[in-house]
Amino acid sequence: MNELQEIVTFEELRIARASLPEPVGFVPTMGFLHEGHLSLVKRACEQSASVVVSIFVNPTQFAPTDDLDAYPRDLERDRELLREAGVDLLWIPTPEEMYPPGFQTWVEAEKITKPLEGAKRPGHFRGVTTVVAKLFNAVQPQMAFFGQKDAQQVAVIRRMVRDLNMPIEIVASPIIRERDGLAMSSRNTYLNEAERQAASVLYKSLLAAQSAYKKGERSADSLRRVMEGIITDEPLARLEYISCADYDSLEELTVVSGKTLLSLAVYLGRTRLIDNLVFG
């Protein structure tokens, strides 16, 4: 088992990074790790000579109405999980380290951040792209590992890496699900028992649309209606959006052809969950 080195500052990172064997794999997280995160770490360990994980609850991607302080945290448990996984370096920058006084420089993708999560969470992706660009610039990885559950985030980061000519391969790993199909997420801990049982409806709606596609349905509106019907049949679920979009551009489709992203956001009580499925 590797000895896990833990650092805080950019200067400590520069020193530690210089001695890491190449290639370096990087897994940026906000902590409170679950099996989804650990699947990324495992893949990074398999494909990289060294693995760096960051834990940083990024304040700039939270809306003013979000409760940043309520975001779940368990640093001691995270440390132990990463140690057991064989991670080489754990970077835990502070908000003051990441955004020092007078900070005013932002990285922002445009068109690709406007729909879906971007439409519902203004400013969210500006925070994501800025912090990920800073993390990439500091860690200098050859590969960075993200979960497919945050499908728009993966698309946005790929766009940023292409547009800014960053020499980093973005590796998207499949969604890790609970036994009933619910995508693993730190937010699942907010669900009460009834909401948790109802939450499987997200994946059921995606599977139903996929089944219709496999039977020959190519109308994007028809696939959206299949999903909507299943969600609205669940009394505890409140639908926020449903999308059937091009996988790369995230532009909504009329007719499905090529690689396609089905995605949705649903409220169960006060908890907002997202999920997606890729086909074609």
Image: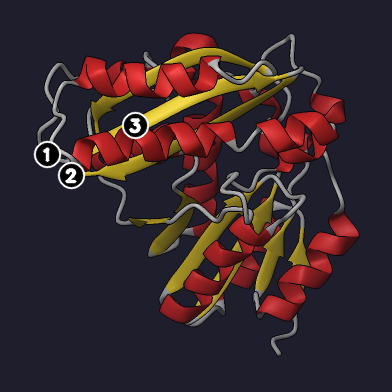
Q: Position of residue 247 (x, y in %)?
A: 25, 35
Label 2 belongs to which residue? 280
The residue pinned by badge 3 equals 262
Q: Which SS class for mark 2?
A: loop
Q: Quadrant of residue 153?
A: top left
First of labels 2, 1 by sequence position: 1
Secondary element at image label 1 = loop
Q: Position of residue 202 (x, y in %)?
A: 53, 32
Q: Are marks 2 and 1 in contact (CB under 8 Å)?
A: yes
State which tag comes first along the sequence, 2 or 3: 3
Give the residue at x 39% y 40%.
207
CA gap, disc 2 and disc 1: 5 Å
Q: Quadrant of residue 167?
A: bottom left
Q: Position of residue 107 (x, y in %)?
A: 44, 26
Determine the image quadrant of residue 269. top right
The type of residue carrying mark 3 is Leu
At x 34% / y 37%, what residue is drawn? 155
Q: Indicate the amino acid at tag 1.
A: Gly
- Res 258 label: 1
Pick the front one: 69 or 278: 278
Looking at the image, which is closer to me, 137 or 84?
A: 84
Can you say whether 35 is above or below 215 in the image? below
